[in-house]
Image (cartoon, rainbow, N blue to C red):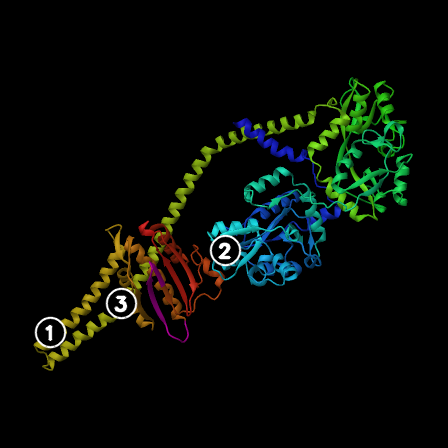
Amino acid sequence: MFLNKIWFFFLALILPLLAENSLHLSNQEKAFLKKHPVITVHNEMDYPPYNFYKDGKAQGLSIDYMNLLAKRLGVKVRYIHGPTWSEFIKMIKEGKLDVMLNVIYTPQRGESLHFTEPYASTRKAIFTEDLSINTMNDLMGKKVCVPKDFFIHHFLETYYPEILLKTKPSLLDCLHSVENNESDATIASYSVAKALIQREKILIRHISVLTDKRMERGLSIATGPKLKMLRDIIQKAMYTIDNRELEALSKKWLDKSPQNPDRLKAVGTQIKPYRHKRVVLMCNNPNWEPIEFAKDGNMSRMTGIAIDTLRLVENKLNVEFRNVPTRSWVESQQYLKEGKCEILPAAIATKERKEYARFTRPYLSYRLVIITRKDKPLVNNLSELADKTIARKRGSGLISRLKQLYPTMKIIETKNYLESLQKVAEGEAYATIATIPVAAYYINRFNLKNLRVAGYTEMKYRLSVAVTKKEPELLHKLDGALATINPVEKNALYNYWIGQKKLIEPFDYKKLYLALSVVLILVILLLYRHWLLKGHNKLLTKEVQKATEEVVAQRTMIREREKLAVLGEMIGVIAHQWRQPLNSLALSLQNLKYRYRDGEVDEEFIDRFVGKNLDRINFLNQTIEDFRNFFHNREGKKQFSVREAIKAIFAIYSLDLRNNGIEFRGIEGDDFELEGIKSEFQQIFLSLITNSKEALEHKKGGARWIRVILKNRQIVFEDSAGGVADEGLLNRLFEADFTTKPGGTGIGLYISKEIIEKKFGGKIRVENGEEGLRVILDFEDRNNE
């Protein structure tokens, strides 16, 4: 299992480096993608199975297709959902959106948007309750509902003005309109309407697929007015989507019933042939076997891999490729410049050739290999041949390049590829350089058994069809038609010309060494990591234990500090609470003395005196009792009334609040119970009342009040002290040692948060209210979980 994981990791690491990039982007296109790593794409809310929004993400066939293209291009997609179709059209025209999916081309849209070739074919169908409606003629004078600004809307306006059109924002609205007999019918893409009908369980009895060819339109991808290059890049990526991927998308999203006419198709298959047979004049390289050459020296009979490849697309395009005889490759290029022919079947797109020709995407790509005798060692790169003798066909552009790179290299110029290989086989040259098809063709045909591929160069021949700049339509048709040639056809041509016998190629030990190195490094790293972890585990255990003890001690110290602070505050409050009753009691006793001296003490007076002073003594006694209950709770956790617990704390503070001109507006709302230690809960309100009292004492003008609201297992504590001016500080109020008060410690609210969250499982937050700070304690359903 471990080795499997290592191997898969190795493959994931190495294979991308070895993979061939099937996209052939220009430098300008690569720069565009680098500058635009994220593209915005429209995502409709309800256009299944192609494009819709569900479960918080973009979904559908078109979405998956776009994701495949984005993966090919190495870009990210940001899907935009919400706007209507008309709004999306406006956005892309104004440059606020890069790409629209599942768009049908119309001349009107083509004036401002750039369209790719269609990637899906759709057929329109009539959806109706009327069994007598089967054709477009049956809809004359009928009310037909269509989505506003869809293709079918403009099509019916133009070609069927007799139909009474009724527009709705979406196709779903139109289907409901038919179901409810508000409209006689709607016309829509078969797959889209069928998906909506099944999902929404809409009852529409009759569906008739239309045969009007004008409505058989394909879905394309469109880019904005200034994004033609992006359209070209996406088009190239579309050419790389193979039939296997298209089949997977169809299987996932499209109804496979025979009644469904909608299909995905490989881009390129829809290239339209010429209406009348067209002769295309081509000039060739007469001596480049097996790529293209004159058969038996007859310049009018060209053959080879490139020629047979063109024959595969002749019928698709309704053309005949006819050779214009030339004596050499140089003359063929000159003929194309002069307009004596229209194409070169197998040419490399060079800077010089681009001045007079345009090129299809490369359809053949061959790596240049180094051929030596079997008794010679393998070659890692061309630099190892710097002092060797190399044979190469006369006139090859590679000769000048080799002389420039390796001045000491000896080069024998030969009349053809066969002579170059024979020089190597006979020992007159150490090596030659050729593409694999050329080398394999001659080695197999002439039985040069003592030769093999000794190494690879970094150079490749990427062959395209060069088309004169005067024929852009021909270029477009060839480009699309060549893209339809499948791998089976390409392999058949290769095997026909090269044969089944493979060249002896070198085993790439560099890849093996790289793989073994990666595996060895991973094993060493894992062993070293295991050793480090084992060594550090004990140390970490001790450090964690020590840190835990420190945290516990620190928390205990903080709690004690807070308790002492609360104790001091409570003693001060009690002193205030007692001062006025004691003064009243003293005055009452003095008054008793004077009343007795004046003879006014009777039984009625004594009853009033005793009752009044007993109330004062009971008040003093209750204050001490509340204080004692708060600091000496021996009952542990139990259910208690929130209202009564808060009310007891305000009773302690009532006189102090009145003396400072602060009104306690009471406790509003419905009571509820919490389970826990009541005194810990009350400690929260001691901190809140103390903070509010201090803030209100500094308030200048206006009413001073505090109130508490109970609602849905929430407690809202609110005052009129003005709140916190800097709202950025609100979230910091519960941090330890953070305070907004001069000389404050910041401990009170920190401890309150700890008690709420860890002892009662609740949450606490603060916000600015209308007149002051609002503290919200939330216990919703937490005691019932």
Name the one closer to the observer, 442 or 310.
310
- Secondary structure of the residue carrying tag 1 is helix
The percent position of residue 101, horizontal first and vertical second, equals: 62, 51
Q: Nearer the viewer, residue 295 or 438?
A: 295
Establish if 654 lies above or below 296. below
Q: Amino acid at mark 2?
A: Glu
* Residue drawn at x 37%, y 74% as measured from the top left: 703
C-alpha gap between disc 2 and disc 3: 85 Å
* Magenta extent: 699-716
Quickly name the residue at label 2: 129
Per the model, the C-alpha gap separating discs 1 and 3 is 25 Å
Q: Quadrant of residue 749?
A: bottom left
Q: Is residue 771 left or right of residue 353?
A: left
In the picture as drawn, the residue positioned furthest to the bottom comes out as 598
Q: Are marks 1 and 3 in contact (CB under 8 Å)?
A: no
The answer to whether one can see residue 453 in this image is yes
Q: Which mark is residue 607?
A: 1
Where 296 falls versus 604 (above or below)?
above
User: Which image quadrant is residue 571 in?
Assistant: bottom left
Q: What residue is rendered at 58% in x and 42% in y?
A: 249
Q: Position of residue 59 (x, y in %)?
A: 55, 48
Amino acid found under the numbered disc labelled 3: Gln
| Pointer 3 residue | 577
- Residue at disc 3, secondary structure: helix
